[in-house]
Amino acid sequence: MAQADMESGREGEDGECESDVIAEGNLLGGFVESTETRALIAGLAEMHDDIKNRESVTQRFLVIMDRYQEQPHLLDPHLEWMLNLLLEQIRSEQSPPLLVHLGFKFLYIISKVRGHKVFMQLFPHEVSDLQPVLDLLTRQDPKDHETWETRYMLLLWLSMTCLIPFDLSRLDGHLTSEPGLGREPIMDRILAVAKSYLTVSDKSRDAASMLVSKFVTRPDVKLKRLGDFLDWCLTTVAQSNELTMEGTVVLDGMLQSLAQLFKHGKREDFLQYAPTVLQCLDQRRLPESNQAMLRKLGVKLVQRLGLTFLKPRLAKWRYQRGNRSLAANLSQSSKAADPQGPQPSLEPSGMEEDYDIPEEIENVIEQLLVGLKDKETIVRWSAAKGVGRVTGRLPKELADEVVGSVLDCFSFQETDNAWHGGCLALAELGRRGLLLPSRLPDVVPLVLKALTYDEKRGACSVGSNVRDAACYVCWAFARAYEPPELKPFVTQIASALLITTVFDRNVNCRRAASAAFQENVGRQGTFPHGIDILTAADYFAVGNLNNCYLSISVYIASFPEYTRPLIDHLVSRKVNHWHGGIRELATKALHNLTPQAPDYMANTVLPQLLPMAIGLDMHGRHGAILACAEITHALYKLTSQTDRPVTDVLPSDCVEGLKVIHQKLFDRQQYRGFGGELMRPAVCALIEKLSLSRMPFKDDPVISGWQWLIDDCLKSLHVISSSAKQNIKEAAVSALAALCQEY
């Protein structure tokens, strides 16, 4: 879930074609270009030496495959024959090197779409395949930038063939019997190839780390080479200089291979080496590195080490939700919760003695918590998953300490990075059952704050990633807890998610909140009017910001549970927003929401806005003046239906407050300079709306003050910037028309 700025969000708001693109993408029912693809592959042998034809065919193949990026499973029935056709050409002795490289390029394109983990399993991996693949790989030139796909695919292929269930020394028998050859054993050759490709600068490095993880963990290899290989890795890590490009590449390869080894290797094989590896990482001080990828790999390796130190176990104390079937949950949502349903069970005291917590675990958890506050999302995400995995193997008391440390991320002294990392960690802990219901009273208020996190930085703001992650927390909680556990917080969570769904200025956050609300409606079944609201505020409807503020919000506010929360949010967070467009939308939304709660607007909201309208904050003044104008006009429309003046519903002090706004601002010279470009059109809008509302100001000195202000706006246009001139002119003319008609 990634951060996007306002401009990128609006591309989705105004683009009508987006739904068409998605609909078209979902139309794919199978691999319809099967015949054309077969013809393209079969024709490679004839046209490979013509550069124009070669590029044309490659481009066409790319276009075909890219269509299936969203639905790669549709390729599954066809992967085998595509692989066999290409391998037939690659293995043929008549195939020139150019055709072999082209075949591997096509294999790479397929694996990129389907995913290398699925595709590499289809490679033939008999004993007879090992030697030819290794020979072909050793003949490659690692410095040839045109053929990196060949080396990448060969390394993946070798990582499959090296899994043969025989001792590799059996394959060396015929080599040692011939005098004078002196060739290396197969085991050493594969290890040498893997080491050489761990330090290259192309994608082959990733494949080499996969080869290492599968090869070095073989029973025969780990006995003879595991210690030496780890020693070589750690020595290389200690000696590499990350300030050079070459050193960064080498560190990347070493850390990738170590992370893969500690992931796929058996705990009993690697436990003895884990303290040494952790010590080496501490000396390397990776969290201080300028390279985000190195910090991410460091966090990934640290969490793997933590999992190696701790015995694999499912914590007995974790919260376990009973029935996670959505269909079953929906069928039971109207019934009372089952009192006999599974409840979190505390671990028996005897089981606590089985926990053996090495002293290194404190270091591991500390590094993961630091990773939660990293400036890059990829590092924070990896750290959050590490916190979840490691906490699941701790005793209850220690796990609760970790949860407390995660909650420290939600301090207003912390940056938006810490809030984002904290949200990701909470979601991971929640969905793993490691956030016990007793912690929810502490957690939910912090998540609600994160849902509205928005901090101004210069001419923009940060926090959309925090709000997006907070939606993920709510989504995860819907799946993690039984409805009775979340019941005390349902009203707060539902209101906060709907506020984000309709009032967040970032389209990704609105859609994430809508998805989280939908998940809660389905899994919890306790959100008021959930199905009705989802019908109006679905994925596509919330794509348009104007529609959210002016239409969907009015529908949601028609349900009494959500009326005041929506209004309060607009008054407290949006009327004084740093972005002018949001302020104006918020005031129009308040106009549309007034009929839902006219008394609340007149007696509570307007008295809150009037001090803001003459306050010191320029954005707050601008929004509050417009909001006062819109609310007063909306109240007038309501009272005029029963032939009553608007003053019947407006408190007398509010009427006086509205009258003196322009005078107080004039006394402080608020109409001059940059502030004037905001204040002039706002006060003109106030004059227009108060005139249209037929306020009882006839023969009042305020009318001549309004008249002077409108005249001054039109006289001063020559000193106004060109960007604001038209706006002021239109506002003044509209205000003058309304003023003359009424007074």
Image (cartoon, rainbow, N blue to C red):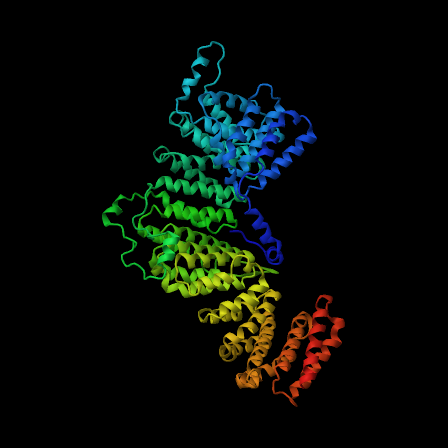
Compared with 548, 367 (above or below) is above
Q: Relative to the observer, which residue lies in front, 445 or 330?
A: 330
Q: Position of residue 583 (x, y in %)?
A: 59, 68
Compared with 470, 710 (above or below) is below
Describe residue 216's horizontal placement relative to residue 17 as left or right.
Answer: left
> Can I make out residue 541 in this image?
yes
In the rendered image, the quadrant that contains the C terminus is bottom right
Describe residue 718's horizontal placement relative to residue 681 as left or right.
Answer: right
Q: Relative to the observer, which residue lies in front, 620 or 121?
A: 121
Compared with 721, 714 (above or below) is below
Identify the residue at horizontal 46%, vertical 22% (top origin).
Answer: 188
Q: Position of residue 29 (x, y in %)?
A: 53, 43
Task: Write down the quadrant of residue 103 in the picture.
Answer: top right
Q: Position of residue 643 (x, y in %)?
A: 57, 86
Task: Write down the quadrant of residue 508 in the picture.
Answer: bottom right
Compared with 428, 297 (above or below) is above
Identify the residue at horizontal 36%, vertical 62% (top origin).
Answer: 334
Q: Position of residue 511 (x, y in %)?
A: 52, 57
Q: Relative to the observer, which residue lies in front, 342 or 352?
A: 342
Question: Which residue appears farthest toward the top when viewing the image?
Answer: 179
